[in-house]
Image (cartoon, rainbow, N blue to C red):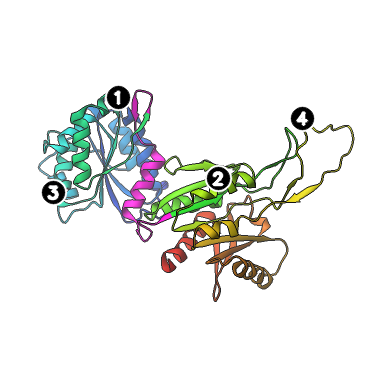
Amino acid sequence: MHPSEEIYREKSNKLMGKTIVVGITGSIAAVDSFHLIRELVKNGAKVVPVMTQAATRLSAPDAIEFASGMKPITEITGQCEHIKYLGSPSDADLFLIYPCTANTISKMANGIDDSPVTTMATVALGSRTPVAIAPAMHGYMMENPAVEKNLETLAEWGVNIIGPHIDRERAKVASVNEVVAWAIRLLSKDDLIGKKILIIGGRSEEPMDSMRLITNRSTGLMAVSLAQSAFERGAEVELWMGASSVPMPDYIPVRRYGTVDDLIGLLKDIDHDVVIVPAALADFAPESVFDGKIPSEKGFSMKLRSVPKVLPLIREKCSYVIGYKAESGLSGDRLIARARERLEQYDLVAVVANDVDAAGKTSASMHLVTKNDVRNITGTKPVISEGILNFVAENL
């Protein structure tokens, strides 16, 4: 068994059955192509690597073969690799160039095919095979009027341009995670395309003094999983996060809040089609915050105040709101009943109900409760996210 087969579908089946031709060109970012290919394989893709001569000096062809399980194409031969993989009908579902230099961008926009990658691009554009590029270059090159115009031309032709991200004077290539998410977005179901979805997650933190907080065990994983899945299904996604202990996706806009009052201050900006709220928010906060650090030598008493409920305030701004309800030690029927009470109280579309034990865990069993139905969803947080978004896509 080739090592690439050992990691096949290690992360997901989202690209299973898909063939992606990955073009690698002569940017120093080519060193990241090994990792990109591995991540595509881990999500189920078959990867066909194609390299320019300049790319082979930056990323070893043997390493690329190890990552993909296929010897990289470094020249077009009598086998007509460009037609085989990207002609119509073709073997490939997507032509992805990572990284894509200013030179390659300009040649693509002007029909020049003098390398295996640009020849593949010419055929892909002609056969209407989906094309995506991840530009990488110096910032001044990106600002060259010719390069800007060539990028505009490619965009007009339907080429998906991923990044770059400007960092001082560099137009840095999009991260591997972002490019993989885009590959999934382009090749998966697009049943949420054009929809603006807001995910509010993480945990609130209510200060007791200058050091201590009242908070909970929520990690934010549910919210991140929902945001990633919604992006992959074509939605325009925004993520509002409290405290969390999981990495944020670098390709989704994130806004932060600390206390419940901080979050309430953000609500004026809601203009979304859907709001999903897996956030673990405090029900109580200290009536006053101690100035400095509460002395630890002796006991103390603290008076708590109720904090405003956020769901009804969100409901005033959006008609399609899905809330969450966590309870402890209830039977399934009683948990569902409590969720339905919350649903009716705040006029929500649905409520996702779970036991508090799900907080901080990667897998759980949850009930998606509507007025007339209950869907039981069990699995990892990404699996549960897909189940929730299936409901949204069916009922929006």
Residue designated by label 3: 126
Dot in front, 4 or 1? 4
- Mark 3, secondary structure of its residue: helix
Outermost residue to the bottom: 372
203 falls in the magenta region = no
Sequence-wise, the earlier of marks 4 and 2 is 2
Q: What element carries label 2?
A: strand
**Between marks 3 and 4 in the image, the one whose residue lies nearer the viewer:** 4
Tell me: residue 168, above or below residue 199: above
Q: Which amino acid does label 2 sit on?
A: Met
Amino acid type, label 1: His
The answer to whether mark 4 and mark 1 are in CB contact below 8 A is no
Q: In this view, does 277 lie to the left or right of 145?
A: right
Q: Horizontally, is 296 left or right of 56 in the view?
A: right
Q: Give the CA separation, mark 4 to mark 1.
A: 48 Å
Segment colored magenta: 167-196
Give the residue pinned by disc 4. Answer: 292
Residue 267 visible at all: yes
| Vertical comparison of 219 with 369: above or below | above
Name the mark nearer the viewer: 1 or 2. Answer: 2
Is 255 on the left-hand or right-hand side of 396? Answer: right
Of pointers 4 and 1, the one earlier in the residue sequence: 1
Residue assigned mark 1: 138
